[in-house]
Amino acid sequence: MPTTNHAPATNSPYVHGYSPQETRRLGDQADTLAALLHAGTAYEPGSRVLEAGCGVGAQTVHLVRSSPGAQIVAVDHSEESLAQARAHVTAQAPAAPVTWRHADLRQLPFPRASFDHVFTCFVLEHLQDPAQALAELRRVLRPGGTLTVIEGDHGSALFHPDSRHAQTVIDHQVRLQSAAGGNALIGRELHPLLARAGYAAITVRPRTVYADATRPTLVDGFTRKTFIAMIESVRDEALAAGLTTTAAWNRGITDLRRTTDPDGTFHYTFFKATARKPQP
Amino acid sequence: MPTTNHAPATNSPYVHGYSPQETRRLGDQADTLAALLHAGTAYEPGSRVLEAGCGVGAQTVHLVRSSPGAQIVAVDHSEESLAQARAHVTAQAPAAPVTWRHADLRQLPFPRASFDHVFTCFVLEHLQDPAQALAELRRVLRPGGTLTVIEGDHGSALFHPDSRHAQTVIDHQVRLQSAAGGNALIGRELHPLLARAGYAAITVRPRTVYADATRPTLVDGFTRKTFIAMIESVRDEALAAGLTTTAAWNRGITDLRRTTDPDGTFHYTFFKATARKPQP
C-alpha cells in the first residue's frame, strides 16, 4: 500500500520504514493525506485509545492533534519503529499523553475491554491473518467501543497517460507484498473482514485521492513522494525475485513518473471503516 | 461507462438506450446516482443552459429539478432518444422550460456565445473526437460561462471477491467501446482534454460509488442494475466479436454478481469536471 507506516509482520525486506529517507517519506505522505484520512476521527477527552501498529508514528501525531485529551496507547511489534515514533511524536507534541508499548498484535498485553477506541492504519495489509488481529482488537475493546481501520487498495490506482508498463511495476509490488503474507488489495475487503470478526455498525467509505496539475501539492506529496516512492522502494526485491529486468522496471517507473507531468493525472482510493464491538 | 444515457456516435450496437428495459435501467441508475453526480450543479434562474447529448433524459430531469428557473436547451443526435427524453421529462416536470433540439455535437445549430452554461454527462466517452466536441461547446459558451462534464472510468471498477473472470468481461466492454471509437477509460483524461481545449479554471474531482451490504440500495441500484446490467448488455457483441465464449462470459458475469452477495463489495469512480471559457 502506498503509505505503509508499519514494519512488516515478517522479515521480508520489501517493507521498510527504517532509513532516514523512508522516515521523511512517511512524514511527507502523512501530512499530505492527514486531512483526507483523519477527517471524522476525534476521540473524547479522557477516553482510552489504542493505536494498533503505530509504526514510526506517522499517524500518531495526527491522532494526538485531533484528540488532544485522549489517553493514547501506541503499540508496535518493532522496537526500532517504536523508538522512532516516540522521538517523532515527542518532537511534535512534547506534552501529548502517549504511552508506548512493544507488543504483538496477535497477543496484546492488555486485559479485555481495556480501551474505549481502537485505531489502526495501514497495518492489516501486512498481516498474514488479519482476522486474528481483528479478533484480538475486539477483545481489548470495551463493549460499545469503536474500531477505526484505514487501508489502501492498489487496484484503485488509475492514471493518465495509461501504461501497461506502469501497471506491471505496481503488480510486482502487489505480488511481493502477497508473497510476504500481506495483501495490498485489502481495502475492498474491509467490510467482510469486520463483519466476520463480529463487529457491528460497520461503515466503510472510500477516501479518494485525485491529483492533477491543479493540485501540485498532491502531485508531489502523494503521486510522486508517496505512491511512486513506495513502488520504487521494491525495485531490488522485484529484481532479486526475477519478476522484472532493469530495463522493464525503469520503463514502468518512467511511465509512472510521466503521470506527474502537467497533463498527467493520478487516482487512488483508501478505505476507512468504523465499527463497534457489540454490547453483550 | 456504467451509466450511458447517450446514443453512440456510431451505429455500433454495443451502446443501446432504445429498448424499454434499457430506458428503465437508465432511470434506475440516474435516481441512485443523482445525488452523487449532480451535487454542486445548480444554475441561476434565467440562465441559458445547454445539455449537450441528453440521451433519453436521465440527467435532464435532475437538471430541471436542481435549476428550476434555468432555460434548458437539450440536444441529442438521435431523434428517437430525444423523443423519449421529452416524454420522460414532460411526465416528471410538465412545466419545465426545456427546449429540445435535434443536433450534432460536432456542429451545433447555435451562434457563438449562446449559452451561460453547458452540461454534458456520459457523452464524451462515446465520441471519436472528444476534443472537437469540447471546442464546439466552447464556441457556443459565452466568455466566462461554465462547462460541467461528468464521465466514468471503468479502470476504477474494483470489487470483492476479486476475480479475473469478472475483470475480463469488463475488459471486453472497454474493448468494444474502443472499437466503436469511444473510450470507457476517459474519466482520468478529463483534465488534459479540457486544458488542451482552452478552458480555464479547470477543477476535476472524483465522485466515488462504494456499495456493500450496509447500502442495499446502492448494491441493487448501482452494482446490479447499473454496472453489471451495462456489462451484460454487450454479451452478444462480445460473442459476435469472438472476444469470449458463452462459458467464459457466464463465468465472468457470475463472478460479477457474486460481488452483490452480503459479503461482497463494489467500488467505481466517476469524474466530475467544471471549467470556464476564458474572458477574451
Image (spheres, coloured by chain):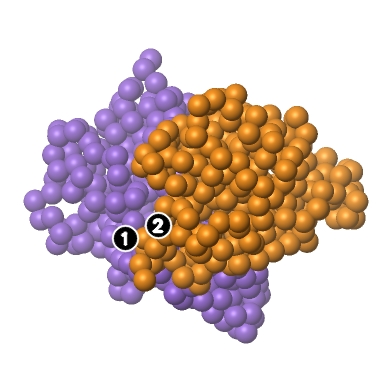
Chain colours: A purple, B orange
Disc 1 marks a residue whose amino acid type is Thr
Q: Nearer the viewer, residue A148 or B83?
A: B83
Q: Is residue A59 visible?
A: yes
**Relative vertical location of residue B9 with respect to residue A164 in this rendering, above or below:** above
Q: Which residue is drawn at 32% across and 37% down?
A: A118
Please provide percent x and percent y for residue B84.
69, 34
The residue at the point 63 percent across, 29 percent down is B88
The circle drawn on residue A32 is: 1
**Dot 2, crowdedness within 10 Å: few (<14), some or many (≥20)?**
many
Q: Which residue is nearer to you in this view: A106 or A29?
A: A29
Q: Residue A173: percent from the left, percent from the top?
A: 56, 65
Residue B22, compared with residue A153, is above or below; it is above
Q: Mark 2 points at which residue?
A: B145
Residue A240 position by quadrant: bottom right
**Residue A247, horizontal then vertical, whole percent:** 62, 84
Residue A159 versus residue B6 in the image, above or below: below
Q: Badge 2 sits on which subunit?
A: B
| Chain for numbered disc 1 | A
Q: Which residue lies furthest to the bottom in this view?
A: A247
Taking A163 as reference, is B13 left or right? right
Residue at (61% x, 37% y) in the render: B57
Residue B22, percent from left and from top: 73, 34
**Secondary element at tag 1:** helix
Q: Which residue is situated farthest in the top direction here?
A: A280
**How far apart are the alpha carbons under marks 1 and 2?**
33 Å
Label 2 secondary element: strand
Is residue B274 visible in the rendered image? The answer is no
Asked if marks 1 and 2 fall on the same chain, the answer is no
* Quadrant (top left, top right, bottom left, bottom right) of the C terminus of chain B: bottom left
Q: Dot 1, how many residues are within 10 Å of its Cα: few (below 14), some (14-19), or many (20+)? A: some
Residue type indicated by callout 2 = Gly
Nearest the viewer among B85 and B155 is B85
